[in-house]
Image (cartoon, rainbow, N blue to C red):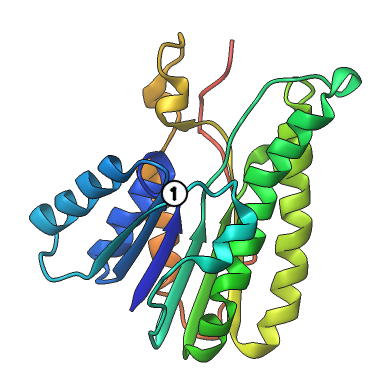
Amino acid sequence: MKAIISGASKGIGRASAIALAKEGFDLILISRNESDLQELSDHIHEALNPNLDISCIAFDMTNSEEIQDLKMDLDSERLVLVNNVGSYMNDNASSIDLNELERMLSINLKSSIELTKKCLPSLRKAKRSLVVNISSINGLDADHIAASYSISKHALRAWNNALREEVRKEGIKVTALYPGPVNTRSWDGMDVDHEAMIQAEDIGEIIASLTKLSDWALVEEVKINPLQFKLS
């Protein structure tokens, strides 16, 4: 069993790696920060399972054209891909900077498309395959103070749904997650109730649970919101 996780060094990506490691998955971890990846790998080996095969790839996922050149051993009878890399910004619809919109699309959409294309031959070869695309609640309902981000996440939803219907006949599962506010480092320094947010570990556990379903059960999408957290 093997899992590939982008944006793996922090937040949801890190929690997903730990949750899947607990299930016995070997890991291919992708992030820009090599030292953070190595720290995560060491933590998993020391705290969870010293026998897991963990590969760390320091790579900037905005280089979408170069993703096809990544060297990864994807040979496995069971393969999970978690497209988690993403970036957030605030802007208004009436004053969108097209260069910033392109940056959002590159990080939040194109990177997932290219990494999935890279993995797709191996996903098709594996006996059991799952693709999990980490979106946002703003991929369902646009936020007027995060227009470019919302556009990129709506586009991700469109691609996710098209991919799901294309490959389900091949036995490949595609699931989209739409979380609301998650307690990650992006909220550091802000006057918010971190404990009332969704925890990154919650998302990791949801992803791990998807791997436990029968071959015939497909969770198409999951919307997750905090029980009581409100932005002031």
Where is the C terminus found, in terms of image quarters?
top right
The image quadrant that residue 51 belongs to is bottom left
Neighbourhood count class around disc 1 (C-alpha, 10 Å): few under 14, some 14–19, many 20 upward: many
Q: Can residue 176 be seen at all in this image of the molecule?
A: yes
Which residue sits at x=57%, y=83%?
121
Where is the N terminus found, in terms of image quarters?
bottom left
Q: Can residue 141 be seen at all in this image of the molecule?
A: no
Which residue sits at x=40%, y=27%?
185
Q: Amino acid at mark 1?
A: Ile
Q: Looking at the picture, tell me which residue is in the foreground, 200 or 64.
A: 64
Q: Is residue 106 left or right of residue 3?
A: right
Is 115 drawn above or below residue 196 in the view shown? below
Q: Looking at the picture, tell me which residue is in the foreground, 24 or 102.
A: 102
Residue 107, percent from left and from top: 63, 44
Residue 123, percent from left and from top: 53, 81
Residue 164, percent from left and from top: 70, 72
Q: Residue tagged by mark 1?
A: 203
